[in-house]
Each structure stands twice: as C-alpha cells, then as structure tokens.
Image (cartoon, grey):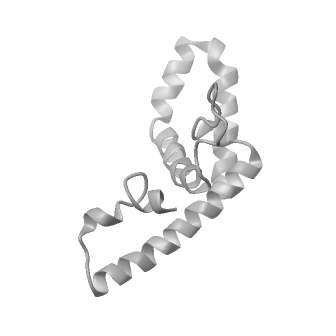
Amino acid sequence: MFRDFKSSGYNLEDTNASGQRLISLILLISHAYTAATISGQKIKRMGVQKYVGRIKESGRIVRRHSSFYIGLYGSNWVNFMENSYELVAELMTLAPNKRKYYQQGERAMRLILSAS
C-alpha cells in the first residue's frame, strides 16, 4: 500500500502539500485508491489481468502487480486502445494473422470496462 502512494501510484510525497490541502488530498486519494483496488479485484476475478500487466515471469514466485496497479492501469490501457483504434485497424490490415489476438484483446477490453 505504501508503494502505491509513492512513485508507482499517486506520488503523494512530491506534492509538498500541508495542512488542509494535505488532508483534502489524502481524502481524495483514499477514494481513488479504493476505486482502483476494487476495479483491479474485479479484473483479476474475470481473468483478464494478463492484458494489463505481466503476472508471470520465469522464476518468479510472488505475484507481480497488486489489485491497485491492475485497476489503475487497466483503465489507462482501455483509454489507450480507444484513442488508437484507427491505427490498430490499419495495422490489422497489414497483419491479418494477428486478428485472433486482437479479438482476444477487444474482449478483455470490454470486460475491463464492465468492471469499472
């Protein structure tokens, strides 16, 4: 949890906020953190977390990403895919053999959107 508030999440320390601003920022971050964690748990239950972050590496025993990471970057991944839809469609015409994987990614995107 502490890492999520530092460089791999919200960068709370770099804000240099104090007093009432710090309290307000912590309240806002706690709501956002809860929403991202719940969304990440839903994505993991659906089994599409492999599209958001690599969950297995050779020789790795401990899971790589937390529910917070999966929830936060799942929405970023979907937003990127939506914004680059035309480019991806053009690339699919160049490599039609990749259509199966593209369709799997589209299905994962729909599931992630339903979890949000």
* Residue 47 at x, y percent in the picture: 74, 43
Q: Quadrant location of the C terminus? A: bottom right
The residue lying furthest to the bottom in this view is 20
Q: Is residue 78 left or right of residue 44?
A: left
Who's the residue at 68% across and 29% down the image?
103
Q: Is residue 46 left or right of residue 57?
A: right
Q: Is residue 75 left or right of residue 58?
A: left
Who's the residue at 49% across and 48% down the image?
76
* Residue 92 at x, y percent in the picture: 56, 19
Q: Is residue 31 above or below residue 14?
A: below
Q: Is residue 16 left or right of residue 61?
A: left
Which quarter of the figure has residue 67? bottom right
Who's the residue at 75% across and 48% down the image?
46
Q: Is residue 73 above or below residue 29?
A: above
Q: How many marks?
A: 0
Question: Nearest the camera: 35 or 110?
Answer: 35
Question: Nearest the camera: 81 or 37?
Answer: 37
Q: Is residue 91 visible?
A: yes
Question: Nearest the camera: 51 or 25?
Answer: 25
* Residue 91 at x, y percent in the picture: 50, 19
Which quarter of the figure has residue 29? bottom left
* Residue 13 at x, y percent in the picture: 31, 65
Who's the residue at 55% across and 16% down the image?
93
Q: Is residue 50 above or below residue 75?
A: above
Q: Is residue 116 visible?
A: no
